[in-house]
Structures are given as C-alpha cells and as structure tokens.
Amino acid sequence: MKAAIQFDYSTQGQAVRQSARSGDLSGHTSGLARGNLQGNVVILPSSHAGSFLQYCLNNPKPCPLIGVSALGDPALPSLGRDIDIRTDLPRYRVFHNGVYDEETTNIVELWSDDFMTFVIGCSFTFEQALQDNGVAVRNIDDELNVPMFRTNIETMPAGPFCGPLIVTMRPVKTELVPAAFEATRPFTHSHGVPIHVGAASDLGIADLDKPDFGDAIEVAEGEVPVFWACGVTPQLALGVAKPPICITHSPGSMLVTDLNGDEPPTVDFPFSMITTNK
C-alpha cells in the first residue's frame, strides 16, 4: 500500500505570490491555493502602528491578527518564505490622509523604512472547509469576488481608529447553515463562525445586489444569506484616523501565505507599541 502524499502548502502559496509579483495575477484570490491561510493587509507609518494594533486587539472578530512585520521590513518570515509585501499582493489600495487615492499592482516606489505591516486573517481561508462539509461556495463556483457590505454595527475604537463593521456574505442552503457554522468554527484566526444569518436589513444592509466591495451574488430560492465579519473593516477606520499614508490590499486580493489554514499562527509583536505610539 502506498503512503499518503503530504500536500505542500508552501508550494502553492509561493506560486500565487510569484504570479502577483510578476503581474500575471491582478484579481481576487478566492479559490486560489485552497487550504492555505490568506490575509488582509494594512501598512501604516509607525506613528499610527500602536493605535492600529490596539484596534485589532479590541476587535478580534473582524481583525484577527496573523502577522506583524518588523519596522521597515517588507518580509514576513513567519508567514512564508521570500514574502515581499511590496509586490506579492495582486492589487493594493493607497490612501492619503484617510482618503482613497489609487489602486496599483506594486508599492515598491511608495515603500518607506517607517512602515509596519499588519496581516489579518481572511475568510477565503475557510472556504475549502465549507466545501468539504458540503456547503457550496458560490463566489468560487461562479468565479466571482465575495460580496462585502458595510453594516450598522460599530467597532470598538482605539485612538483615532473607529468605524463600522464590514461583513462578507455567502448564500447557504437553509438546511446547511448548521454545517456552515461547524465548518468555520475552528477558524477563529480567519473570522470563525458567522455573525448573522437571514435578513440583511438587521445589519443595516439595504440591498444585497449592491455590495460596497466585491461582486453581487444572488441568494437563490432555498438559500439564506450568511454573514461573516470581514478584514476589510479597517479600511473604513482609516478614513477616520487619517494617517498621512496607508496602503492596504484591494478587497479580495489577499496575501496568500505558506501556512496551512487549519493552524492558527503564532504572532509576535511588541505590546509596548500600544502605549508608546499615537
């Protein structure tokens, strides 16, 4: 009897990053590197890093930290070999004084030795677990970006950072909602179980056909909308905090790490940042 083949998660993570680095990949990463841990990205000057760290700690559901860089270092060795955060996302968003300015496919020319990178777990990580538990993931099946919506739920502030919660929505057959909860329960580092099932209006969402980010996905007969907290949440908090510059992933265009999505990573960061920075 042949031994089972061990899947090398690092190989597919590196392949996705190399595709982004070369410019071949500039879209969303849903359905890519299935089983790998994916992450939202926020890059800030050191003056705002401490308050943003506290914002993430105050809001672990939408902002579960999976990685923090050293000051000025574009590498994230705890998340993968040869990561260069300046080139390895398919698309980036650039904000000046809290105002969205542009999208770009690399930030080499914008990089500063004063930057720190924060990586926040992404729900794309658990999509394979949903499928393995018999729950269809329509954004993958239809080759779409997941829809994301602003809600009427306020996050807990930290320093200048505050704002509403963002959620992702995936239609789930009504009888499979318990399976969706069980499949995502272990993924606390990637938002975990849903925060709401059913009427979008309960979250202040007026129209599921008009997401704030991503693509609209129809909720078919026999399905119910299921909502998870989303790591795009900090992008609205940036508009309040107004750092002189901030760079994030473009919603849906994630950092694909080398790590198995089933295993929460260990995050090392200096707690002194919380009290010594703005």
Image (cartoon, rainbow, N blue to C red):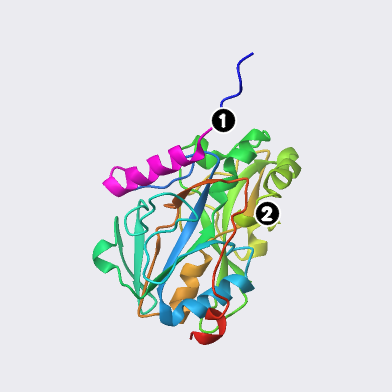
Count of number-bearing discs:
2
Magenta run includes residue 16: yes
- The location of residue 263, given as percent across then percent down, is 62, 48
| Residue at x-position 51% and y-position 79% | 50
Image quadrant for the N terminus? top right
- For label 2, the SS is loop
- For label 1, the SS is loop
User: Local crowd at mark 2 within 10 Å, few (<14), some, or many (≥20)?
Assistant: some
User: Local crowd at mark 1 within 10 Å, few (<14), some, or many (≥20)?
Assistant: few
The image quadrant that residue 229 belongs to is: bottom right
Checking the image for residue 204, the label placed there is none
> What is the residue that sits farthest to the left in this orientation?
109
**Of 209 and 260, which appears nearest the observer?**
260
- The location of residue 10, given as percent across then percent down, is 47, 41
Residue on which the image places disc 1: 6
Checking the image for residue 194, the label placed there is 2
Q: Earlier in the sequence, mark 2 or mark 1?
A: 1
Magenta part of the chain: 7-25
Q: Say whether residue 220 is left or right of residue 48.
A: right
Q: Is residue 235 above or below residue 83?
A: below
Q: CA distance from mark 2 to mark 1?
A: 31 Å
Magenta run includes residue 274: no
Q: Main secondary structure of the magenta part?
A: helix
Q: What's the residue type where badge 1 is placed?
A: Gln
| Residue at x-position 65% and y-position 42% | 172
Q: Is residue 63 above or below residue 181?
A: below
**Of 97 and 219, which appears nearest the observer?**
97
- The location of residue 244, given as percent across then percent down, is 35, 80
Q: What's the residue type where badge 2 is placed?
A: Pro
